[in-house]
Image (spheres, rainbow, N blue to C red):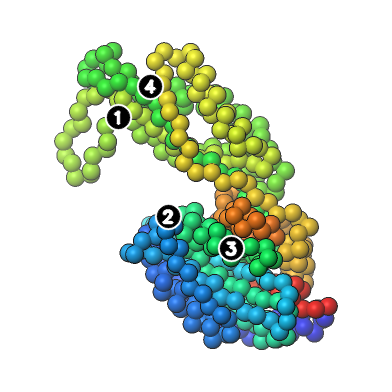
Amino acid sequence: MNITTSDRLIKEIETRREALIELTQQLIRIPTLNPPGLKYREICTFLAERLGQSGFKIELIRAEGAIADSDKYPRWNLIARHEGASTGECVHFNSHHDVVEVGHGWTRDPFGGELEDGKIYGRGACDMKGGLATSIIAAEAFIAICPDYAGAIEISATADEESGGFGGVAYLAEKGYFNPDRVQHVIIPEPLNKDRICLGHRGVWWAEIETKGRIAHGSMPFLGDCAVRHMGAVLEEMETHLFPLLATKHTDMPVVPDGAKESTLNINSIHGGAVEQDPDYTGLPAPCVPDRCRIIIDRRFLIEEDIDVVKSEVTQMLEKIKAIRPDFEYEIRDLFEVQPSMTAEDAPVVQTVAKAIEAVMHKRPEYVVSPGTYDQKHIDRIGKLKNCIAYGPGILDLAHQPDEWIGVQDMVDSAQVMALALADLLLPD
Ligand SMILES: [Zn+2]
């Protein structure tokens, strides 16, 4: 790419600043809440019209049969593809179109898309409708300036990232849309900050542990066996041995924030004994010895760890308790697992975006890894496509928060980076 092309792209994005603001607002105003998965068809139709006018060929794909797909809440996805003047590689921008619940504490209309002091407010502003709008403006500007490019550009808006991505990227990957023969470079515009490149994420293992007891009258607990006390023994063992063990495990992955450079475990929930009554129940509970107690654990593991070892640390701990604690019975059930994913720093999409960040922001990018997972897992594991990063505008900490916002200047800067990256990958030398 020559200097003139790069300058022209940067200027072209600048002239589209108002269009970028308007598109972001339009996307925020479609409340695609997940769960349960509202307005998915509406946002895909809106994008189909927009991208169709820009010369993209549109596919609307419902993830039929995927988890959570139903006639009431269909999981709609959009893939838009623009062909260049000759054959070449395909650059794909993947954004999820769903947003999480609003929650409390807002001082703005969560679906108003208000613009004030260079910030656009709303649920999904940074995670990730701002990123989606940024990639669309970048692609449209690139096509306008470089219509004779080689290869293809794809933009997808996919369902359900916030609930695992099974009705979105996982479904599309299974159908071959992320096959490396079809797509060579993937950029996911999640809000990782405009000068950082996210190479991947840690692994996840969720499990439910249940301790078993025997029900009896609460006035004679010696006639029963208290499952909550058994779970107490599990928690104590975790405090004295498991948490200290996890704190010794450090990764060389550049995970942010620093606390996530260690292995972590969260106890998501605990429940034992009688089911909690509705708030409108005014009576007392019945006196019973609890015969079941359950916890759900959320273990995040590092690329240096093996998932079988991660699991056996917990089962060995339970077996150790069983060996010394009378009447200790337990069950453990796997709920969910994701392997860690990390794209190599020398991968083409990483190096290209790094160069573009230097050109636009005059600084070297920071390479990071996300503490939690996102759709890269499906592109890596199902699609077998390794040349994938998350790069997009917005401050990660604002995701899922009240008064979520995206900065207009951050979007403009990021759109310039994306457009330069397209030029680098799709223009013949
Ligand atoms: Zn997101």
Q: CA distance from mark 1 to mark 4?
A: 11 Å
Give the mark, 4 or 3, whose residue is nearer the N terminus. Answer: 3
Give the mark, 3 or 2, whose residue is nearer the N terminus. Answer: 2
Which residue bears the numbered disc 3? Answer: 176
Task: Please name the residue shown 46% across and 41% down the image.
Answer: 335
Badge 3 vs badge 1, beta-carbon distance below 8 Å: no
- In this view, 35 is above or below 357: above
Amino acid tagged 3: Gly
Which residue bears the numbered disc 1? Answer: 273
Which residue bears the numbered disc 4? Answer: 229
- In this view, 23 is above or below 270: below
Residue 216 vs residue 173, the one in the foreground: 173
User: In the visual, does 310 lie left or right of 12?
Assistant: left
- In this view, 240 is above or below 30: above
Disc number for residue 67: 2
Disc 1, SS: loop
Amino acid tagged 1: Gly
- Viewer-side label of 4, 3: 3
User: In the visual, does 379 lie left or right of 125?
Assistant: right
- Viewer-side label of 2, 1: 2
